């Protein structure tokens, strides 16, 4: 792999300084980054060194290292890049350790969507649902956790009765070969905030690290639920709306992603 600082999408990545007053808990730090990797491992998302995360914090882009046990990485193991200067700020001392093989996917997604965080998981449900659903999209409606999903078109959360659509792409021998299929997803599904990779896992992106983490948790729950529903032949998408409930949740929908410009 060529140096990530020469990656075409990283070279074109610019910070959107127009977005202020995000509904964040705080900027991503190296300490927080490594703590999150432990949490993701404990959730079964990053076993066997699988999974990865990329996150923009201020003018820096942090990316997890490749092939290390993700729950054991320390602050000095995280790759850090300066976005304006296009330079490497920090890397592990051991030169044999490379940046995540997902880094080129993260820079593409960040550049195309304006997202500040991408989380890649290997949860069993993300894998299993793609074997139950043979088509190229996962869809679910009328679920409470759909309200935890950001809609880039409105800049608000989706409604309970909305249909969440997650495109499914085929797995490839290497992560970098997912670049073109993911580019296709971004072009053909501009409203998408996630993609499932068949027999592999899930990528989720969002305006902040907090919203991306929350969405990944909501989606993982919905995938787990959908597996059980599929087994019992319960339809994932229901007809008809719940207008009263949706109106009541309008304030909540705005609050959840307030201050976040649509990407
Ligand atoms: C054993 S995991 C194979 C690679 C993969 O799918 C993954 O998510 C981890 O990639 P990384 O280069 O970040 O370790
Ligand atoms: Zn993977």
Image (cartoon, grey):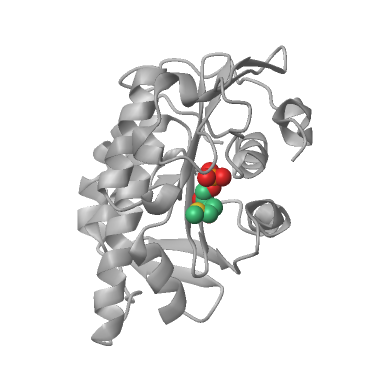
The answer to whether 107 is drawn above or below residue 21 in the figure is below
Which quadrant is home to the N terminus?
Answer: top right
The answer to whether 240 is drawn above or below residue 150 in the figure is below
* Residue 192 in view: no
- At 56% from the left and 19% from the top, the residue drawn is 93
Estimate the x, y position of residue 55 in percent, counting from the top left: 50, 29
Horizontal side of 8 relative to 224 (left or right) equals right
- At 78% from the left and 29% from the top, the residue drawn is 6
Number of callouts = 0
Specify the quadrant of the image occupied by residue 162.
Answer: bottom left
Which quadrant is home to the C terminus?
Answer: top right
* Residue 126 in view: yes
Along the line of sight, the residue nearer the viewer: 82 or 205 = 82
Estimate the x, y position of residue 170 in percent, counting from the top left: 60, 69
Estimate the x, y position of residue 80 in percent, counting from the top left: 56, 20
Specify the quadrant of the image occupied by residue 59.
Answer: top right
Along the line of sight, the residue nearer the viewer: 12 or 75 = 75
- At 34% from the left and 66% from the top, the residue drawn is 141
Along the line of sight, the residue nearer the viewer: 220 or 238 = 220
The answer to whether 239 is drawn above or below residue 78 in the figure is below
Horizontal side of 8 relative to 217 (left or right) equals right
Horizontal side of 210 relative to 54 (left or right) equals left
- Of all residues, the one furthest to the bottom in this rendering is 233
Estimate the x, y position of residue 151 in percent, counting from the top left: 45, 46
């Amino acid at each position: 792999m060529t140096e990530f600082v020469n990656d075409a999408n990283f070279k074109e990545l610019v910070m959107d300084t127009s977005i202020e007053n995000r509904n964040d808990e705080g900027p991503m730090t190296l300490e927080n980054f490594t703590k999150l990797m432990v949490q993701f491992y404990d959730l079964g998302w990053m076993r066997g060194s699988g999974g990865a995360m990329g996150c923009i914090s201020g003018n820096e882009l942090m990316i997890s290292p490749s092939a290390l046990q993700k729950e054991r990485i320390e602050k000095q193991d995280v790759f850090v890049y300066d976005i304006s200067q296009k330079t490497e700020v920090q890397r592990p001392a051991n030169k044999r350790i490379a940046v995540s093989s997902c880094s080129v996917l993260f820079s593409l997604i960040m550049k195309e969507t304006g997202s500040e965080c991408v989380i890649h998981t290997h949860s069993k449900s993300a894998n299993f649902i793609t074997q139950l659903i043979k088509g190229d999209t996962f869809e679910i409606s009328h679920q409470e956790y759909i309200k935890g999903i950001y809609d880039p078109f409105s800049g608000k959360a989706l409604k309970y009765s909305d249909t969440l659509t997650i495109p499914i792409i085929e797995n490839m021998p290497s992560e970098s070969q997912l670049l073109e299929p993911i580019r296709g997803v971004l072009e053909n599904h501009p409203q998408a905030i996630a993609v499932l990779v068949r027999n592999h896992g899930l990528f989720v992106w969002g305006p902040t690290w907090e919203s991306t983490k929350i969405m990944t948790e909501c989606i993982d729950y919905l995938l787990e639920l959908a597996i059980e529903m599929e087994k019992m032949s319960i339809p994932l998408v229901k007809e008809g709306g719940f207008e009263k409930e949706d109106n009541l949740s309008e304030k909540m929908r705005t609050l959840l992603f307030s201050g976040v410009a649509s990407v």
